[in-house]
Image: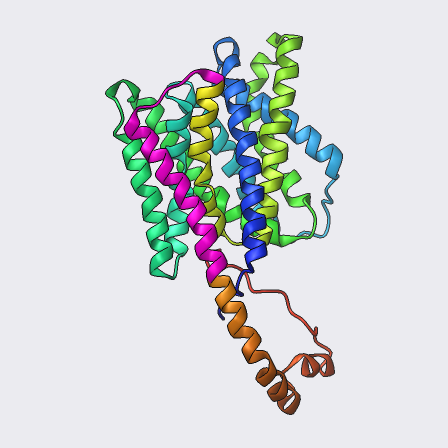
Amino acid sequence: MAQAALSPRAVLGAAALVVGGSAGVQVSAALSSRLFSAYGSFAVSGMRMAIAAVVLLAVIRPRLRGRGPGEWLGIGLYGAAMAVMNLSLYAAIDRIPLGIAVTLEFLGPCAVALAATRRLREAGVALLALAGVALISAGPLGYFDAAGYAAALCAAAAFGGYTLLAARVGKAGSELDGLALSVGIAAALTLPLAAPHVGEVKPADLGLLAVCAVVGVAIPCSLDTLAGRLSSARVIGTLFAVDPAMGALVGFALLGERLSPAALAGVLLVAVSGALVVWVSAGGAGEADGGSAANEGGAAGQGAAEGTGAGGDAARGGPAGSPPPADPAL
């Protein structure tokens, strides 16, 4: 069955949510990096995730009963992807500039978008983003750190899984219950790395961690999940292209990190690909919507005769309108 077309409003709404989430993630990462020397990147990531889990579980109060094994599997994998992604990204930005770490991390969503594409122009957008990543990776040798690059690529793999699961968990229910449970699982997975340092945290640092937890985990993950509900893994996978540009900007503004001209050109290419996916997807959705509108009259008439239209569904006791099919990539 063909995937239901996305409306331009849905694509633009998803874009706004992803941009808002990206800003929170990058600002939180920059602020959290100030605590690495005192507690280590893993401990900071774990404590931040634990605080975010407490906030989300207290506010959302997710239900535990009535979930099937498949739904719990999606929630668990989403939480595991969050845990690996955050630990790996923080290990990376402890060694390499934020803008470069975040750009390498984008390889994950870029791969998801490229694998799920069905049109040549969409593949071109994903490849444009990949070219930007190549320019950034070809920056000054002083930026190269094998462990930092390895950590960023590990974050990329987890980010790819996160992209797929954001759409799956987002469409699984009408609330953010699944997200709250996933963040709780991520906190449980990272807590062993944070627990030995909890007693050492100063009050001022605890306040900073709380801000970073809300701004960098609770709010962005909620926005990403809502974006997944509005669109698809392919669309949000390319929309995450805004992360490298946001990371470079925040790294310069808050950490004083300067990138080479080649790296800046790469960041620009990646950001442009994010804008193009909105234009390409919205344009394709408009064409699809127009085509479906033109066919609705004929389909309605045929349904009345054969009992297969909305009226036929109601006559059989079925729903008059069925939800759109799941993203084939999932």
Q: What is the tally of numbered marks visible in this picture?
A: 0
Identity of the residue drawn at 57% across and 12% down: 197
| Magenta stretch, overall SS | helix
Q: Is 152 in front, or is 182? A: 152
Q: Residue at x 65, y 25 (%)?
A: 51
Residue 310, placed above or below residue 211: below
Q: Position of residue 324 (x, y in %)?
A: 59, 65
Using the rendered view, name the quadrant where residue 110 is placed: top left
Q: Is any part of residue 111 visible from this angle?
A: yes
Residue at 33%, 52% in the rendered image = 124
Residue at 60%, 52% (x, y): give it.
Answer: 229
Q: Nearer the viewer, residue 327 or 236?
A: 236
Judge whether residue 88 can be spotted in this image.
no
**Residue 273 located left or right of residue 170:** left
Kindly indicate the quadrant of the structure image that contains residue 213: top right
Position of residue 104 in the picture relative to residue 243 (left or right): left
| Residue 188 against residue 235 in the figure, above or below | above
Location of residue 205 with respect to 51 vertically, above or below: above
Report if residue 195 lies within the magenta region.
no
* Magenta span of residues: 254-283
